[in-house]
Each structure stands twice: as C-alpha cells, then as structure tokens.
Image: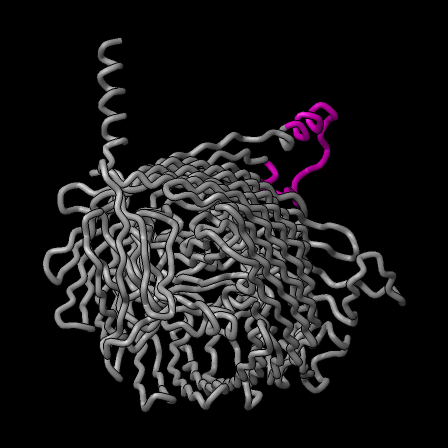
Amino acid sequence: MIRHSLISTAIITALSSFSAHAGIIKGQVLDTNNQPISQADVHIHGKTQSIKTDDNGQFSINVDANSQLHISKSNYIDARIAVNEASSALNITLTPTSVETMVVYASALHKNSLEMISPVSVLAGDELRNKAKPTLGETLKGIPGVNASYFGPVSSSPIIRGLDGPRVKITQNGLDSSDASRIGPDHATSNDSLAAEQIEVLRGPATLLYGSGAIGGVVNVVDNRIPTDNIEQLTGAVEYTHDTVSNANTYAAKLETGHNNFNFHFDGTKRTGDDYQTPRFDLPEEEHEEHDGHEEEEEHETATSVENTFIDSQTVNFGTSYVGEHFTLGLAYGRIDTDYGIPAHEHHEHEHDHELGHDHEDGEETPVYARVEQDRWQGLMSYALHNNWIETINLRVGYTDYRHAEIEDGAIGTIFSNETTEARLNIEHKFANWHGMVGYHFSDSDYDANGEEAFTPASKTTSHAIFILEEQQIGDVTIEFGARLEDYTIDSAIADHDHDHDHDHDHDHDHDHDHDHDHDESNAQTQLYSKSFTNLSVSAGGIWQYTPGQSIALSLSHSERAPLSAELLSNGVHIATGTYELGLGYEIEEGEIHFEPEDIKQETSTNIDLSFRRFSGDFGYTVNFFYNDIENFYYQQNTGLVFDEEHGLEAAEEGHEGDMTVYQFVSKDAQLYGLEFDAHYKINSNAMIKLFGDSTTAKLSSDDNNLPRIPANKLGSELQYNLNDWQFSLTGTHYFEQNDITAYETATDSYTLFDAQANYQLTVGPVDTQFYINIDNITDELGFVHSSFIKDKAPLPGRNFRIGVRGYF
C-alpha cells in the first residue's frame, strides 16, 4: 500500500505542478509596415481555445505557466513566442507570405502548411467552397499529386501519387470515415465536402498517427460539428447552387451559437441531380450491342450522357460542446441518406424515378443504384494541464454504423455494412528541448456483405497501436522522429462455397442419397480464419529555413501494411467492375479455387520525400520529389482465366459470351516515383498567375512492367484577378496521354479542360452575400480518366454552368 501511495503521490504531483501565479498578457500584432492586423488567431500552445485580435491588432490572454504563444493569420507566416505570467506587453510582427497558410489539424502538433516536413495541401475558405463537388475525388483532383478514381461523378475517391483504395486513409476530424469506399470503386465516400471547414491532403506515408491504411497518404475532412472555441453570438450561412450539366440543385445551411461556454452547431445539405451530360462519345462495343439489339453491321452508336448517374442526398450534423479555460467536452451526431446511380451495370432504356416503388411499363428494368445510410457519433474530451511536462491530454472517440445497399429492379440485391468503433488518445508533452506526442489508437471494424455482389466475406478487423512523435528546433532547423507499433488482426468465416468452384459438370451423378446428404453438409460448412500482423512504422525528417521565407524539407519513412479483408479474402463476381476477384489467400489449381493462405507477407514501403519551398515575396513555389520502394505490393493481376456460373473457370481463349475475366490479388515488389509542383507569381496587387503539375511512374521492380490504372500526368495554369468587389479566375489543365499501361489495359488519349469563375461580393445589412458563376469544361472537351475502372463508359462531364449564391450572417 505504501508503494501504491508513493506512486499516486508522484503522479498527482506531476499532473498538478502548475505555476503558483497566473497573469494576463497583453500585446499587439502588426505587419511589416507597422500596421495593425485584425482578426489574427492567438492561443496558448496546447489549449484548444483561441482569441482574435481587435481592429487595432490588440489582444489580452491569460497565462498560468511558462508557455508558447501561437499567432496565425491567413497570408502571414505564423509567429511563436515564449511567454510566462510575468511577460510584459508584446509587440509581434508577422511577415507576409505569398501563399495562404493554414493550421493542419492532421499534423497533431499544431503545425501550419509551411511548417510541415511532409508535403501537405489544404483547401479552405472560399477556395474550398468554389471547388467543392459531391465527392472528395472530384473536389481534390486539381491538387498536384492528387487524382480521382472516377466511377462517375457521384462515386470518385482520391488517388495520391498513384495510390488509392486501402492505401489512402480518409478521415473526418482525425477519425476513420468507416465506410465501404476502400472495398470497391463504385462505393462512394461518406464524407461531405460541402459541409467541411477545410480539407487536408497529406502526401506520402502518414502511418504514424493514422495506421497502416495510410501508407499512401491521408485526406482529413475538418468540420466544426464539435466546436472547440467559444461562440459568443448566433452565426450562420446558407447556400444554393444549380449545375446545368446534370440539372442538379444543392442546398446547404449552417447555424452556430453559444452561451456561457456552451456551444451548439448544426449543418445540413441536400443535393439532387439527374444523369450527367457529356460530349458525344462512342459506346463500347458491348454497350452498343445491348443498347439497340442490332448486330455488328449497324453503324457504331454514340451517346451524349452517362446513364444511371443520378444523385439524391441529404446530410445533417448536430454538435455541442463545453469549452472552459482548461477543459473541453463535446459530442456530435451525423446522419447521411444518399441514393446514387451506379453506371455500367448494363441496364438500359429507362429513366430514374426517385420513388422506389415506381412501376415501369413494358417490363422495363429499373436502374441499379446504391442507397447509403450512415449514423456517426463523435466525442471529444480535452484537458490542458500546462505543467512542466504534460501540456494536453486529448481523447477522440467515434462510433459509425454504415449501410450500403445496392438496389436492382426495385429489390435489394446486395448489402454492405460496416460497424466501427474507434478511439484515439493523445498526450502532448515537453521534455527538455523536445516537444511531442505519445498516444494509443484503437479501431474495431465489423464488416459484412450479403447478396450476389458480396465478393468479400464478412470479417472483423481489430487494431491496437501505440505511437510517439517528437520534434526539436535547433536554430533554423526543425527535426522530427516518430514510431508506431500496431497489432492488426483479421477474423472471418470462409464458407466452402466461397472457395470451392469445382462444378463437376462431367462427373457421374449416380450417387446414393447418403452421399448426396454428406456432400450438402460439406457445402454448408465454414472454415474459421484468423490472421494477426504486427506492423511497425518509423520516420525521421527535418526542415531547414535556410533564409526567411524559403526552406528545404527531407523525410524518410518505413511503413508496414497488412492486407484488408478485400485484398486477402475476396472470392466472387464484382458486378460493378465486371470481373471475378480473388484474394491473396487463394490458389488456383487445375481449374479449381482453394483457400490456402499460407504465406501472406506485409506490404512494406520505404519512402523518401524532398521538398523545396519559397513562400515570401511576389514569387513562390513548392516542388516535391518522391521515391517509394514497396516490397510485396498488393495489386490485381489478370490470371488469363475467365469465369461464368455454368462453366466455372476456363482459359480465356476457351471462354464463352458473358464470361468475366478473373483478377487475383498478388504481391510483388514495386517502385513509384515522381514529382509535383505548384508555383505562383503575383503580377500586381490585383493579379496572380499559378502553374502546377505532377508526374507519377509506377513499375514492378522485377520486370519493369507498369502497374495498372496509374493516373496520367497533368500540367495546368491559373490566372486570378480581383477588381473591386469582383473576383475572376481562369484555369486550364492538360492531362497527358497515358500509354504506360499493363497488358490488359488500353491507352488513354490526352485532353485539356478549361474552367472559369466569377464571384461578386455584396453586403446587405448584416448579411455578406456572394454571387458566383462557374463554367466548367468551357470547350466541351471529351476526356476519359485512365484511373477509372469504367473509363470507356463514363467520360468526364461536358460543359457545365454552375450558378449560385451564398449568404453569411
């Protein structure tokens, strides 16, 4: 008991070692011309609550220990000042930057986008609202190094440096989005970019904080559904947008208020749209044959729209919080209800009816579409201690109940569900000259699939991880080290019929009743499967501010990733992609499929990033070079076999009409390398020109063959011009021909897209109003996305006029 008492006393002493005195620090924030900067964010490092400077750039803030004052303002370089309760009045000068700086919440150490060692891009404010699309992929695809999978405009996920699916973690406020978008390209992400405050893209491995699923990068959607600052008055925003290319209407609203440290948040969006229009294109041969029922001698048929690409979506989010001097507690609930069409499911001669029970004449089939429902709870608890060692203890928890039903002919055909519980505990600390974070991360995902497209069996994935991230500033250099140790387990029940495709069509069927009975029982049996992995990730890096406004960053990371259930256990027809998919755990022997997961190795990535940045003055740039060497890279390989229900597996040359090509996940060593850049020049106070682009090469190490569906290189330019209350921009992006392909791919032609935008600011009483018009694809260019599974059936949208109005109060 004496021992336990001593330990308890030591812990209490450490956690309560506050300074005996508290003080109020006053100061003023100025620019380099000695003019006051208003509305700059000021907060004590480690606290969630912040204040803003007044019209004279002045502020007053409580300090109860030796701390660091963090001052930030858009278009200025952040300032960090060491203070204590005895500090006198401060005069702080912020240096202007030629690019907008944003705090990156996914960094976990309060870094802004210019201080990050790993390359990062942030969309926020009006730029995000102007570029926001229904899906994350379409919203982010203009960022250098980022592309989209594009299964039509309503299901499009981000691809980072050629990596997508399970290698790109999509999070919301730092917690996994917990949908089924990593399972198949036809599954839309559940994150709503329309309600986001900002979207952060971390390129390269971010596995230290987010786990093995972030081996390629992280997309973090930040919203304010749990307010972390006190809201003193009622504020809100409303928006309406109309898109002509799909006759889509979008409505969005947000309300926030607070009183006596209690804060409340609401936001909601609704979007409806029809099939989208395209420039005229040739339907693929099989599409032509089914579309009109004629033979091949008929002239090839064309189309000017992509069938079954409608959307009908509603989202609502409620949140509340208590924000005290040291303690923050919050809870939020979000609901998503979305119906969207799944193109390329070979159903024609129909129009979508938003009423599920609509009867179609002449026996016409209703389109195949998805119904997504998600309930998501999030909780936040944060306590700022401000003692000598521990700064902040932060806990985020989440529970998500996700359901994705695919509906065909008015009936549910397949249901995908995912029930996820997640918790992340971070302890931010200072030790000697090191500042960092240690933490624990837990995730439990219960995935199930039932129906004809349930090509992946039900599985439960559980992970426990501990991690550490430390940084130290030495003069003009900041160095950073980190490590993560993760225990990852997959549990599943593999049914016999999932892996036994011996159809025995040529066998003798004269068996006795008992034998038949035994055979049926055998088919009903299941094989319990459990596999555990220990994933280790480590990283080291540094950033050198070798002169004011210019820096060089270098990082080296080693990351391990275990396969997802889809990569390991898939065995069935994937209707959306028109293929038969097999996981790593299967072997094909003499035309039969056997479950033999004997030697499953982790995917291991060694990544090097080198960045050059200039962000002051009229000319600035960011140039990133990357090299990623991956051992046991998981990818789908054409087996040379085809499958149908009647004949089972056969060689492709012996196949029949309607057969599906068999693709199997295999693991081979691969190399990915390339560059991305973003440069800008401020012509004068009203005009700026930007140049951006990226290039990615992805090959197998053994034979130098290309990996499949690697995005085409792109090069673009943007001109921005402001005139009084008007803002104009013109963007042109050229996507190069992609002919670095695999044996079963076809090359994709180049194309160029031009987009224009005009905004007008108007203040009417207490409401700030913005009218805008965007013209996307001005020249009505026909473009196909090489990374899409259905590129020939779903080209990019044609010319679109997007007209809208926003109001803020």
Residue 676 lies, in percent from the top left, at: 31, 73
Whether residue 499 is visible to the viewer of this picture, yes or no, is: no
Task: Say which of 674 and 800 sits in front.
Answer: 800
Seen as rendered, the residue at the extreme left is 475
Task: Say which of 314 and 584 sits in front.
Answer: 314
295 horizontally vs 742: left or right: right
Q: Is residue 769 magenta?
A: no
Total residue callouts: 0
Residue 266 lies, in percent from the top left, at: 59, 54
Whether residue 335 is visible to the viewer of this picture, yes or no, is: yes
Q: Is residue 502 magenta?
A: yes
Magenta-tinted stretch:
496-521
Examine the image and state in which quarter residue 112 appears.
bottom left
Examine the image and state in which quarter residue 739 appears.
bottom left
- Residue in view at x 37 percent, y 51 percent: 667
**Which quarter of the rendered picture does the C terminus lie within?**
bottom right
- Residue 256 versus residue 458 in the image, above or below: below
